[in-house]
Amino acid sequence: MAAVAVLAELRLRDGHREKICVKVENNLSCLINGIHQLNADASRLLSELVERENLRGACAEQGQEEEESDEEEESDEEEEEEPQNSQPQPPAKRSRT
C-alpha cells in the first residue's frame, strides 16, 4: 500500500517555498491527527517568520525614529495650532435604494 501524507506549501514574499509534510496512516482518525499536526507545524513556521519580520521592522523603525524626531522638532516650531471651530456631527444617514 502506498504511503499517505498530508502536504502544505507556504510561498514567502521572496518567492521561496516552504513545504510541510506529515505522513499519516490510511484511516480517518490518523488523517485528522495529521491535519492537526500540519496545522501546528504551519503555525510554528509562520510564528518564526513573524518574529523575524518584527526584528527587521524594529531595527528599521529605530533608524527612522531618529530621523523623524529631528524632523518633528523642526516642524513643531513652524506650525501654529489653530482651534477647531466645527462641532462633531454624527455620520450622515444612507438612503436605501
Image (cartoon, helix red, strand yellow):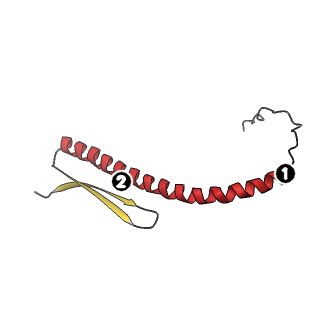
Q: Position of residue 27 (x, y in %)?
A: 16, 45
- Residue at mark 2: 45
The residue that appears at 19% across and 44% down in the rendered structure is 30
Which one is earlier in the sequence, the residue at label 2 or at label 1?
Answer: 2
Amino acid type, label 1? Glu
Where residue 38 sits: x, y (%)?
A: 29, 49
**Can you say whether 16 is above or below 55 in the image?**
below
Give the quarter of the figure containing the N terminus. bottom left
Between 15 and 79, the one lying in front of the other is: 79
Image quarter of residue 71:
bottom right
Mark 2 or 1: in front is 1
Marks 2/1: CA–CA distance: 47 Å
Disc 1 crowd rating (10 Å Cα; few below 14, some 14-19, many 20+) is: few
Left or right: 77, with 67 as reference point: right
Given residues 26 and 72, the one toward you in this image is 72
Q: Is mark 1 on a helix, strand or loop?
A: loop
- Whether label 2 touches label 1, CB < 8 Å: no
Q: Which of 23 and 85 is in front in this view?
A: 85
How far across and down, in percent of the image, does residue 47 sit?
40, 50
> Residue under circle 1?
79
Q: What residue type is labelled 2?
A: Leu
